[in-house]
Amino acid sequence: MTHRSRLAGFIIDCQTDDLDTATRFWSGALGLPIGELSPEESATYAKLDDAPGDLHIEVQKVTHPSRVHLDIEADDVDAEVRRLEALGAKRVAAVHTWVVMEAPTGQRFCVVRMKHPERGATPNVW
């Protein structure tokens, strides 16, 4: 059975107690306006709107060292995780509806559910 996936966007992980200041910095640095999220999401995440290529960009409050990670979105998260494991990635953790993975070279990334397959770049079919 086939599934589809593509680059969803970038998450800017910030080890900070002040998500608002971090978000204002990244908004200014990237020239992207700050978007709206629900009150429960906005304690941990901030969305930046109008990214090129309809990419999803968020600033995220984390407890680990600051870094940038990418998200791969798929219409079948489990199938995409298996495909990436076959390429050498490791499954690190399942969080809510996504899976944190690690590339063979150590970079962390997430596999998330595809939200709008009709928008943005055409997904790859596997």
Image: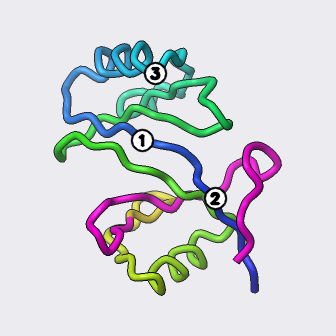
Name above or below for residue 20 compared with residue 125: above
Residue 90 falls in image quadrant: bottom left
Which circle's residue, 2 or 1, is located before the other in the chain?
2
- At 25% from the left and 41% from the top, the residue drawn is 62
Q: Secondary structure at mark 1?
A: strand
Numbered mark located on residue 30 in the image: 3
Amino acid under disc 1: Ile
Mark in the foreground, 1 or 3: 3
Q: Position of residue 11 (x, y in %)?
A: 42, 41
Q: Position of residue 56 (x, y in %)?
A: 57, 38
Which circle's residue, 3 or 2, is located before the other in the chain?
2
- At 61% from the left and 39% from the top, the residue drawn is 55
In the rendered image, the quadrant that contains the C terminus is bottom right
- At 33% from the left and 60% from the top, the residue drawn is 108
Q: Secondary structure at mark 3?
A: helix
Query: Circle 1 is placed at which residue position?
Result: 11
Q: Tell me which segment is drawn in magenta.
A: 101-126
Towards the viewer: 89 or 60: 89
Residue 22 falls in image quadrant: top left
Numbered mark located on residue 81 in the image: none
User: In the image, is residue 7 part of the stretch drawn in magenta?
Assistant: no
Label 3 crowd bin: few (<14), some (14–19), many (20+), radius 10 Å: few
Numbered mark located on residue 6 in the image: 2
Q: Position of residue 64 (x, y in %)?
A: 18, 47
Give the overall secondary structure of the magenta segment: loop
Residue 105 falls in image quadrant: bottom left
